[in-house]
Image: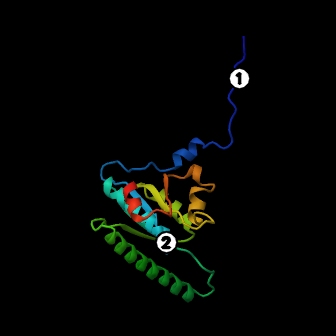
Amino acid sequence: MAKTKQPAETTKSETPAQARARKKRQIFAEGHKRKFLVVVDETPECESALAFAASRALRTQGQLALLYVIEPDVDFQWLGVEDVAREEGHNKAKAVFRLFGRKLKAMGFEDIVPEEIVREGMKAEEITKLIEDDEDIGVLVLGASKDPSGPGPLVTTLAGGRLVGTFPVPITVVPGHLAIEEILALA
């Protein structure tokens, strides 16, 4: 009688416990809408990501979610200084949301009212936590930088780093060299 060879176990595969721990996306369940998440900051590539995500949200009857992450600059020794820095971060987030609201209107997306989310912490960690917490987020949209040195730290970390194989949702990277009109035609 011939022996059958057992398949070799791989050490890099996801365990059943890890697969169960990840929340199932509720994008198409009744009462839910697929959200296109855009991380907003002062970088020029954010506008590309915003245009693409807004267009996809409108065309697919989804929702646009904007995330601003307040990253800690320094470890403060006095509580009062930390509170002032936190308040300044939240004020800056409000200003960025107003700016991107005007940009949406200028692009012709007057009817889109984005969900505005502010988190405090390290950007990549907060993005991942938000996606794990919000089962309606279906796509993360990032804009790539035009800079010849690379696509930018966020794209490199999330779409090209160690997380890419296990990221909970698809990541769309919008090329930085495209004009807004070209992005809207593609979305």
Q: Residue 176 versus residue 136: which sits nearer the camera?
A: 176
Q: Residues within 10 Å of mark 1 (few under 14, many from 20)?
A: few
Q: Which amino acid does label 2 sit on?
A: Pro
Q: Distance between the residues labelled 1 and 2?
A: 56 Å
The kind of residue on which mark 1 rests is Lys
Instruction: Describe the element under mark 1 as helix, strand or loop.
Output: loop
Between 59 and 123, the one nearer to me in the picture: 59
Tell which circle, 1 or 2, labels the residue nearer the N-terminal end.
Answer: 1
Q: Name the residue under label 1.
A: 5
Camera-nearest residue between 43 and 11: 43
Residue tagged 2:
44
Q: Which residue is drawn at 59% across and 49% down?
A: 165
Q: Quadrant of the C terminus?
A: bottom left
Q: Position of residue 5 (x, y in %)?
A: 71, 23
Which residue occupies 60% across, 42% down?
A: 15
Q: Which colour scheme is used?
A: rainbow
From the viewer's perspective, tell me whether residue 131 is left or right of residue 3.
left
Q: Residue furthest top?
A: 1
- Using the rendered view, name the quadrant where residue 79 is placed: bottom right
Residue sitting at x 34%, y 56%: 62
Horizontally, residue 64 falls left or right of residue 162, namely: left
- Position of residue 77 in the picture relative to residue 95 (left or right): right
Which callout, 1 or 2, points to the residue nearer the camera?
A: 2
* Viewer-side residue, 91 vs 109: 109
- Residue 60, given in percent of the width and then of the height, sits at 33, 52
Place of residue 108 in the rendered image (x, y in percent of width and height, measured from the top left): 30, 67
